[in-house]
Image (spheres, rainbow, N blue to C red):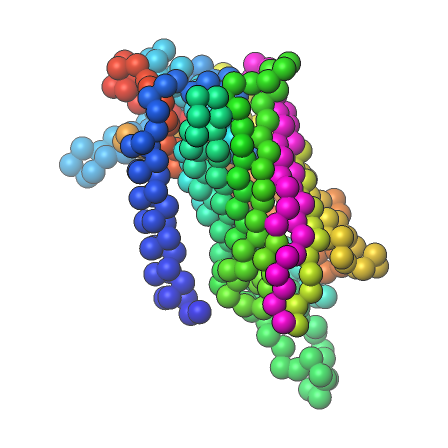
């Protein structure tokens, strides 16, 4: 797949996602979100005073910070809390860009990953939601498998130094109660699936895998803490490919200030149980992130930046990385007219 085809495909994909979001919002129940005391998408924010950044056309263009009303602050506070919760009833479409360095035998390899991660909640009854979370990775990597100074007659020649395209898609289905459980715990459980959507053998697993996923979290004031995990096993394996047995573990803690700024520390660890012990089974990035809610015109968004240090990684794995995340937010449920007529920023 060449880059023009990839760009065209991504354009169609994003248009499709936004179309689905529009349909879901149109059919959403007008009731207030019962999990508003919770949060959506590992790592958002919460607060009482936020910034307003209206952006308009050249004929009427304004930039700057404008005080918000109490309704603005209340709505921003609710969005921030929902955004920190992977299973809230907030529709969101994150575009998460990651750049990681230190890969490969030379230690100079790098990998860019753009994760398109729509989160679509569906009300299936008076008491239950089904939250569908999808992660579609677009990858560009260089020198992850490159050996310097190889003899020209080596069996590894010629070396494929760069790979670009789609990686495998992960999709999770969380069945979650609309109201928090005992002790204010918010939880969801369901299946996770790995689809073999990769466009290059060095970008995918070549398997269809399935397993359980679960998330548990709690919020106290501006503090949110919880864990999301899944375990995947191969059920269909392509010829000449290996089976998958992999766990994903994401404990996180986030604190939101009075200006809707959220500070998050987490780890998005993976364990490859089929890897040889000498090569290393664990990839453990320690991630620190800062996020803020903004509103551009009528569209609320969240902007996030972060850094990653790999406390552990397999042989030839990365050492450190950075992250930038832009999330489009589509609030569901009924809002007051006063809130509908105001705008805010995170």
Q: Quadrant of the N terminus?
A: bottom left
Q: Is residue 334 above or below residue 188?
A: above
Q: Where is residue 289, by image quadrant?
A: top right
State whether residue 179 appears in this view: yes
Mark count:
0
**Looking at the picture, does residue 112 appear above or below residue 49?**
below
Vertical side of 11 occupied by 331: above or below: above
Asked if residue 252 can be seen in this view, the reply is no
- 321, 78: nearer the viewer: 78
Q: Residue at x 37, y 27 (%)?
A: 331
Is residue 183 part of the magenta span, yes or no? Answer: no
Q: Residue furthest bottom?
A: 153
Residue 107 percent location from the top left of the image:
70, 61
Q: Quadrant of residue 2?
A: bottom left
Give x and y (percent) for residue 290.
Answer: 54, 32
Q: Nearer the viewer, residue 251 or 333?
A: 333
Query: Which residue is drawn at the image coordinates 23% and 35% (left, top)?
Result: 56
- What secondary structure is the magenta-colored segment mainly? strand
Say if the magenta span includes residue 227: yes
Of all residues, the one furthest to the top in this rendering is 70
Instruction: Tell me the quarter of the image containing the C terminus.
Output: top left
Residue furthest left as drawn: 59
Q: Position of residue 76 (x, y in %)?
A: 41, 21
Region rendered in magenta: 210-239
User: Which residue is drawn at the image coordinates 48% and 35% (left, top)?
Assistant: 131
Q: Is residue 36 left or right of residue 282?
A: left
261 relative to 283 in the view: left or right: left
| Residue 165 image point, x, y percent | 49, 63
Q: Residue furthest right?
A: 278
Q: Residue at x 79, y 55 (%)?
A: 280
């Amino acid at each position: 797949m060449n880059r023009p085809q990839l760009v065209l495909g991504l354009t169609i994909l994003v248009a499709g996602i936004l179309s689905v979001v529009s349909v879901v919002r149109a059919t959403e129940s007008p009731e207030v979100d019962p999990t508003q005391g919770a949060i959506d998408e590992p790592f958002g924010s919460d607060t009482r005073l936020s910034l307003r950044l209206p952006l308009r056309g050249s004929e009427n263009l304004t930039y700057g910070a404008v005080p918000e009303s109490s309704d603005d602050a209340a709505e921003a506070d609710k969005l921030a809390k929902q955004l920190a919760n992977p299973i809230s009833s907030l529709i969101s479409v994150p575009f998460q860009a990651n750049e990681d360095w230190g890969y490969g035998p030379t230690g100079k390899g790098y990998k860019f990953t753009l994760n398109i991660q729509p989160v679509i909640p569906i009300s299936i009854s008076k008491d239950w939601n089904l939250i569908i979370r999808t992660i579609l990775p677009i990858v560009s990597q260089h020198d992850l498998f490159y050996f310097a100074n190889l003899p020209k007659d080596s069996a590894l020649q010629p070396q494929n130094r760069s790979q670009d395209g789609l990686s495998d898609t992960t999709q999770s289905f969380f069945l979650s109660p609309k109201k928090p459980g005992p002790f204010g715990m918010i939880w969801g459980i369901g299946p996770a699936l790995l689809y073999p959507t990769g466009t290059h053998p060095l970008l995918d697993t070549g398997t269809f895998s399935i397993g359980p996923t679960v998330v548990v979290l709690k919020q106290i004031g501006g503090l949110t803490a919880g864990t999301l995990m899944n375990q995947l096993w191969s059920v269909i394996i392509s010829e000449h490919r290996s089976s998958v047995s992999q766990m994903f573990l994401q404990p996180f803690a986030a604190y939101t200030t009075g200006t809707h700024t959220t500070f998050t520390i987490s780890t998005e660890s993976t364990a490859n149980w089929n890897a040889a012990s000498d090569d290393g089974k664990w990839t453990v990035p320690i991630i620190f992130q800062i996020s803020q809610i903004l509103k551009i015109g009528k569209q609320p968004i969240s902007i996030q930046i972060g850094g990653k240090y790999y406390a552990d990684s397999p042989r030839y794995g990365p050492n450190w990385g950075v992250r930038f995340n832009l999330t489009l937010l589509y609030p569901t449920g009924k809002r007051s007219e006063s809130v509908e007529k105001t705008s805010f920023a995170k």
